[in-house]
Structure formats: C-alpha cells, structure tokens
Image: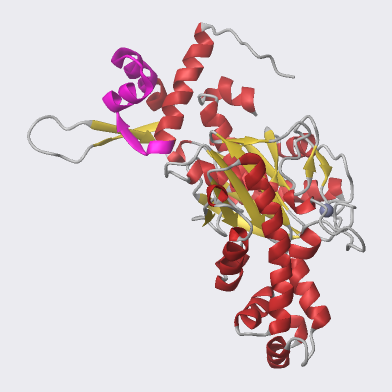
Amino acid sequence: MSPRYLGGNMAGVRGHNRAAVLCCLQEQGALSRKGLSRALGLTPAAMTKITAELLEEGLLRESPAPALGVGRREVLLRLDPHGRCALGVMLGLGRAILSGVWLDGAVIFSETVPLPLRAPAEETVKTLSRRLLALAEENRLERSKTLGLGIAVRGTVAADGRGARSTFDALDEGDFPLCDRFEAYTGLPALLSNNVRALFAAELFLDRERRPDSQFFLRCGSGIGGAFALHGRIWEGEGRQCAEIGHIPVVRRGGKPCHCGKCGCLETVASPEAILTEALLRLSPEETPLLWQAARGKGKENLTLTDVLDAARGADAGAAALVDRGIEYLAGALKSVIYLFDPGKIVLYGKVFDHPYFLSRLRAEMDLGVDGSHRVPLQRSPFNGTLEPKAPGLLVAAAFLQNGGGPESAQKGL
Ligand SMILES: [Zn+2]
C-alpha cells in the first residue's frame, strides 16, 4: 500500500514544477513563458529559472511566435522531441515489435520479429535485446539520449509490475522477470505494462482533445482487451488485471478453451479470431453462400475476417448470424462496463472497427435495452492501427516527463 500523505521538500517542489512545465507543453504544444506562468500558477521569475534549466538540458526549444502587429514578438517554448528517445518491445502472440521513438512518439524505427507460439522466454529476451540494440545503433541513437526500454506484454503482469505473470502462450514461462532480464541484456532501465494498457496510455498521451474524466478503451486484435482511465491515469487494479474484459466468462456450458486457461471467455466467442474460426467451421454453400463464393475465388485458407464481414454485409445470413452473435456478447460486456463505471466515452481500437458492418452492428446492439442516460459515445480511436510501435517507448517517455525530466528524476521512475 502506498502512503496516503507525503511531505514536500525543495527538491521535490523543483521536480514537481519541472514536470508541470514538461507535461503542459507536451499536451498543449507551444506556449510563451507568460502563458506557461499563467497556466501553471507560477511566478514569471520561477518560470524563467525552470525554463532556462530545461533549455540548457536540451529538453525545450524556442521559436518566435507569429507576428500579430507591431511590437516585440513573443518567444514560444515547446518540447524538443529529439532531445531524448526511448526503445520499445511489444511482445504479443507469435510476434514482437521492436521500436525506437522520440519524446513525442514519432517512430524512429520499427521492426516486426516473428516468434513461435510459447517462445522460450530467456532465449527470446536475449535475441530481441540484441536485435533492438543493433537497430538503435543502425539508426545512430545516442546512448546518452536513450532514456530506457518500455515493454508492453500481453497477459497479466506480476504484482511488483516488473515481470509477466502469464503471457497467455506468448512465452513458455509464467512468472518471468521481463524487466530484469531485458535490463541485463540491454543495460537500459526498463518499464513494463500490459499491452492493452500501454496502447491506451499512448492514446491518452497523444490525444490533445479535451478528454472526458473517465474513458474505457476496448481493443479487438486477435483477442479482446480493455483498460480504464480516470483523470488521464490508467487504473491498473489491485492485482494489475484491470480491465480483462476479454476474459469475462460468458458461455456457461461447453465454452471453448481460452489462452488464459479457462473456457467460455468473451474472447472465445467475440474476438475477430474466434469469429473467423467459427465462420471457417461453418463454411458451406447452403449456410454461408457468399463466403463460400469468396472461398472459391481465393481459397479457404486465404479467407480473412474482412471476407466474413463483407459476406455479412452482403446479406449472407449464415455469416451475419455468427458475426451478430459475437457482437451481442461483446455489447453485453460493454453495457456492464457502462452501468458499473459510467465512462465519458468508449474508445474502440482495432482493425475490425474500420469495417462498417461490425461498427454499425455494434452501435445498434449497444442501444438495445439501454436507457438514454446510459448511452455512452463509442469513438473509433483517431490513432487506430498506429500505436503498436509507439506504445512501449512512450511508457518511458511519459514517465520521464511526469518525473520532471533530468537524470535523477528519470531514474526514480524507471
Ligand atoms: Zn480467457
């Protein structure tokens, strides 16, 4: 349990003010010293001192504001995104994405490495670390500017936040100390998060629009994942398992086995992978005529979820029935989220939400049996499909800014 009350000393206040300046500029883009003083409630003298320090350290840069008439032009301050960088590993099922990002999340490099199912943990971390360092070198990233390594992993995270408890078949070992092992092979400090929470953190970091106080993030990739944020911060839960929406048991009897070890989880009936698998099982000229035609054209083994959704949209009753069944389960779980947490919006992330049939059916299903005051906007992420290479490194960048930048505060958070 963390202490409820903490005293402040001068060093703490300095770090707090530096963090306020860095985070304010990250969110708002560019401001003058006067604008920053006003926004943060600090005296102009204090602001001059803090910004001089941050400029000296290469974290900010200055540019003249556009001229609005006669008189002195104001100088604007903004983060220097190239002042620091971070490396990242997104560890998923059957693949890892290695990447490097600047402080603003711009991708410096990104490479997808295929992995076997249940990849040998130690060997995999060693191979990925070596490749990542080679990529950093190829891209001429200076070690002194590299803040650390962010790791986003599928499955559940250990209570201390530094290891994986279960990667749901991505690695062959449960309870694996990912941070320690990556740190040993790369020599960089590491931060770890569940993959969906990392994607949501990246979304919140990059989203400059006025956000509601609370949001729920739904990710449909091969599986289904969720995350919940309050006042811009992600709630991890007591056991760091918030919000495993994909593993809510929804099929009471005869449910299919899930990667998590249970049977009948939401993701076994409603995930894109589950819907495609079910469609392939039921493929026949009688039951799914349009999908059957598509299979004759391109081969059954080449059918994708898009083919199933296209068939459903084109009045293939069999394909539509099984897609709709999945959506009904998914909407049921989301309605529980709404009634329990009353979020300001639900952010949808995943390729499946780009398909008009899936999105319109989900919206229609969400309106059923729900009174007006519980209709929460469903918004497809403006960053849909782009966050995977950014999210792990942004864990490190965000921690660095929130700790006030600088070597001593970076170490505190990493
Ligand atoms: Zn499960």
> Vertical placement of 43 versus 282: above or below?
above
* Of the pair 235 and 56, the residue shown nearer to us: 235
Quick one: quadrant of the C terminus? Answer: top right
* Residue range (magenta): 27-52
Q: Main secondary structure of the magenta part?
A: helix
- Asked if residue 174 lies in the magenta stretch, the reply is no
Residue 332 quadrant: bottom right
**266 on left or right of 252:** left
Going by the picture, which residue comes out furthest to the left? 70
Compared to residue 260, the image places residue 411 above or below, namely above
| Residue 198 % position (x, y) | 64, 44
Foreground pick, 53 / 324: 324
In the rendered image, residue 165, in percent from the top left (x then y), is placed at 84, 40
- Along the line of sight, the residue nearer the viewer: 139 or 55: 55
- Locate residue 44, reporting x and y percent: 29, 16
Q: Which residue is located at x 80 percent, y 31 percent?
A: 159
When the figure is inspected, residue 186 is found, relative to residue 34, above or below; the finding is below
